[in-house]
Amino acid sequence: MASWSTGRVKARKQWSDTVFSLVVEADVEPFKAGQFTKLAYHGEDKRVARAYSYVNPPGQDCEFYLVTIPQGQLTPYLDRLQVGDELLVQRSAAGFLTLDEVPAGRDLWLMATGTGVGPFVSILAEGSCWQQFENIVLVHGVRTADELGYREYIKELTYDKPNFHYVPFVSREQVPDVQAGRITTAISSGKLEQLVGLDFDPEHSRVMICGNPDMVRDTRSVLGEKDLKKHLRRKPGQILMENYW
Ligand SMILES: Cc1cc2nc3c(=O)[nH]c(=O)nc-3n(C[C@H](O)[C@H](O)[C@H](O)COP(=O)(O)OP(=O)(O)OC[C@H]3O[C@@H](n4cnc5c(N)ncnc54)[C@H](O)[C@@H]3O)c2cc1C
Ligand SMILES: NC(=O)c1ccc[n+]([C@@H]2O[C@H](COP(=O)([O-])OP(=O)(O)OC[C@H]3O[C@@H](n4cnc5c(N)ncnc54)[C@H](OP(=O)(O)O)[C@@H]3O)[C@@H](O)[C@H]2O)c1
């Protein structure tokens, strides 16, 4: 079977000028919540392909959460897609930002910027996280409040989970009911732990970080000050990371 499936856009949602979601019908292989596949189009002489995380849990229509990079090669094309349009979807998935890679612990912290929240939405929707951890915290940092994508869906998924905490951060406008500024500042100051009522410590905390590579690096660094370390299969730690660029 060919490694690419021709998918068809089934729905599209625009969250802000640059941030949008595509629901795509495509014949893809099974994947684990937190993994990514590739989307592509055929240019005149070559295929342009990039990685995108599944937002949906396994077994549902493929869904992707995207930000348009105006000077980018692929995203302006994806941004022009409308319901009924076709695109290429790689059948196989990849990636290690999955729960089976996380060592046992008590508290799962999911930290994302921008569209990096996608894999965590998939993990929450898939549902096995609720058996694996006592407490789950989703921390989402964005520039403007309209980019807090999937906020309502996250509420629906977690309405009966008293030990789930959703902590949104908005850095470039002042809005009620969300934290102002960056995730890293709130970790350093202790404000994030205070807000949630849980401390970072190597015994209990497990952290998955996804999105902007500067945020991933800096978050790892401030968590290092609280004795949390990168997790490797050969050298267990607490922090798993995925850089989007
Ligand atoms: C494992 C993985 C999963 C990913 N999942 C998603 C996802 O679910 N949603 C999503 O929107 N993106 C995701 N990305 C990023 C995506 O693969 C593309 O890199 C991005 O969409 C830009 O593609 P482009 O061809 O338009 O830009 P390119 O022509 O490749 O140019 C990208 C350049 O723009 C800069 N840049 C600024 N912001 C970003 C950004 N957000 N992403 C990438 N580059 C940026 C970088 O300097 C980069 O060199 C993922 C990346 C990886 C590695
Ligand atoms: N979102 C948009 O409106 C928009 C518009 C045009 C183009 N784009 C393109 O899309 C790309 C990704 O967009 P994005 O909205 O996901 O932007 P982003 O630049 O990744 O910002 C998302 C959030 O991460 C924060 N952040 C950035 N660096 C950080 C760090 N080192 N530590 C902690 N937090 C950090 C930002 O805070 P700060 O605000 O303090 O940086 C912001 O709150 C951009 O690089 C740009 O190329 C986006």
Image: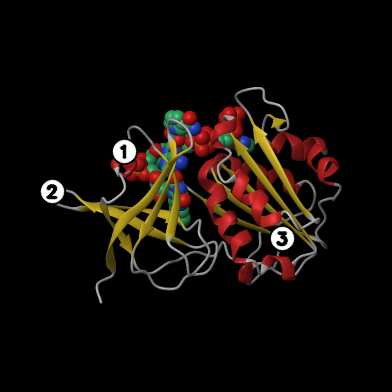
- Mark 3 or mark 2, earlier in chain: 2
Q: How many marks?
A: 3
Residue 198 shows up from this direction: yes
Residue corresponding to mark 2: 44
* Label 1 near ligand 1 (CB < 8 Å): yes
- Mark 1 or mark 3, earlier in chain: 1
| Kind of residue sitting beneath label 1 | Pro
Residue corresponding to mark 1: 76
Q: CA distance from mark 1 to mark 3?
A: 36 Å
Seen in the picture, residue 114 relative to 1 is either above or below; the reply is: above
Residue toward you, 104 or 19: 19
Residue found at x 59% / y 55%? 120
Residue 226, position as x, y percentages in the image:
80, 49
Q: CA distance from mark 3 to mark 2?
A: 45 Å
Residue found at x 70% / y 55%? 158
Q: Quadrant of the N terminus?
A: bottom left
Element at badge 2?
loop
